[in-house]
Image (tube, rainbow, N blue to C red):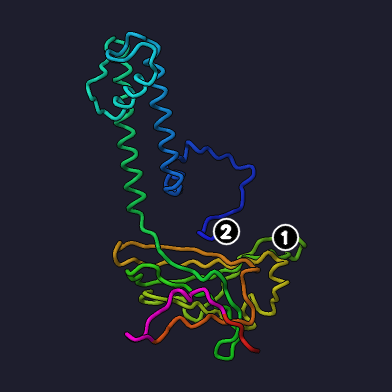
Amino acid sequence: MSRDGRPTLRRAGAQRNALRDLYFSLLRMPWTRLIPFLFLVYMGIVACFALLYALDRDAIAGVRPGHFGDVFFFSVETFATIGYGAFVPKSLYAHIVVTVEAFIGMLAVAMLAGLAFAKFSRPTARVIFSNRAVIGALDRQRVLMIRMANGRESNVIDARVYVTMLRDERTAEGGLMRRFRDLQLERSWTPVFALTWLAVHVIDEASPLYGSTPAALAASNAEIVVTVGGTDVIYAQSVQAQFSYLASEIVWNARFADVIEDGPEGRHVNYDRLHDVEPQVK
C-alpha cells in the first residue's frame, strides 16, 4: 500500500475497461493530472470539429482561405457557445456541424461541472502520520507506537483507529499466504481527535508481533496498515485516512519525542517534532 492509502499491487488477468469506469478514474485522479488531461481532451475535440469545418472551404464566413487557425478558433467559440460574431456558419453543412458541436459542448460543461463539484465536495481527512513507527518500552511494557495528528483546525469526533499487520506466512500444507493480523490497541476510540493521537499496541504473548525481530519482519514482507476514521464537524460527514509502514520503517528500541512544550503563552503542541524519534535505553 502506498503512503496515501492506495494499493500498489498490480492485477494480472483482470480485464479492466477504463472507459467503463471513467467517472471513478477521474474522481481518483489528482487535480495536477486531471486538469491537463481534461485540457488535452478539450483540445482534441475542438481540433476534430475544426477538421470537419475545413472539409468545406465555403462553410464559414469571415475566415481566411486556407487558414486553419481561423477555423480552429471558430470551433473553440462554437464549443464554448461564445459567439463573438467575427466568424459565422455559412453553408448547411456548417450549420449541421455547429449544431452537433454545440450539443457536445453543453454536455461537456454539464459533466465537468458535476465532476468538479463531486471532487470539491468530497470530504477528506487531513491526518498527518509519523513517517516511522517505533517499538520500545512504555509503562514497562514492550509496545508498538504510531503517532498521528489532525492537520486541520476542525475536530474529528467519534474517531476510531485500526492497525493491521500484513505478512507472508506458511500454511500447514506448506503454501504461502498473505495474512492479515489485527493489532489490538490500548485505546482505539476517542470522542474528539483535535490535535495528536498516539496509537499503542502492547506486544505480549497474544500479539502477532510477539518474538518478532527486524530481520523476521523483513523476511516475511511485513507491512503495518493504519486506518483512521471519524466524522468531521465542519463537513458533518465521515472521513477516512490510511497510512502504511514497511518493516524498514519501524524503529526499534526508540520512543517518539515529546510534542507538548511549554512556551511564553502556555502549553502548545509542536507539530514540527511529530516525526522526531529518540533512542531508548534498555
Which image quarter is the N terminus in? Answer: bottom right
For image coordinates 46% across by 76% down, the residue present is 188
Q: CA distance from mark 2 to mark 1?
A: 19 Å
Q: At which x and y percent is residue 35? A: 41, 42
User: Which type of secondary structure does the marked residue at label 2 adopt?
Assistant: loop
For image coordinates 41% across by 64% down, the residue present is 126
Q: Is residue 266 magenta?
A: yes
Could you tell me if the residues under marks 2 and 1 are in contact, i.e. CB atoms within 8 Å? no
What segment carries the magenta color?
A: 263-277
User: Which type of secondary structure does the marked residue at label 1 adopt?
Assistant: strand
Which residue is denoted by mark 2 in the rendering?
Answer: 1
Number of marks in the rendered image: 2
Q: At which x and y percent is residue 13? A: 64, 42
Task: Give the mark, 2 or 1, whose residue is nearer the N terminus.
Answer: 2
Q: Is residue 185 left or right of residue 220?
A: left
Q: Is residue 53 above or below residue 269?
A: above
Q: At which x and y percent is residue 278? A: 58, 81
Q: Is residue 87 left or right of residue 25?
A: left
- Residue extending farthest right: 174
Q: Nearer the viewer, residue 60 or 147?
A: 60
Location of residue 262 by image quarter: bottom left
Q: Is residue 174 magenta?
A: no
Q: Is residue 205 left or right of residue 63?
A: right
Q: How many C-alpha atoms fall within 10 Å of the one at disc 2: few (<14), some, or many (≥20)?
A: some
Which residue is denoted by mark 1 in the rendering?
Answer: 176
Given the image, on which type of amino acid does mark 2 rest? Met
Q: Is residue 90 above or below residue 211?
A: above
- Residue extending farthest bottom: 140
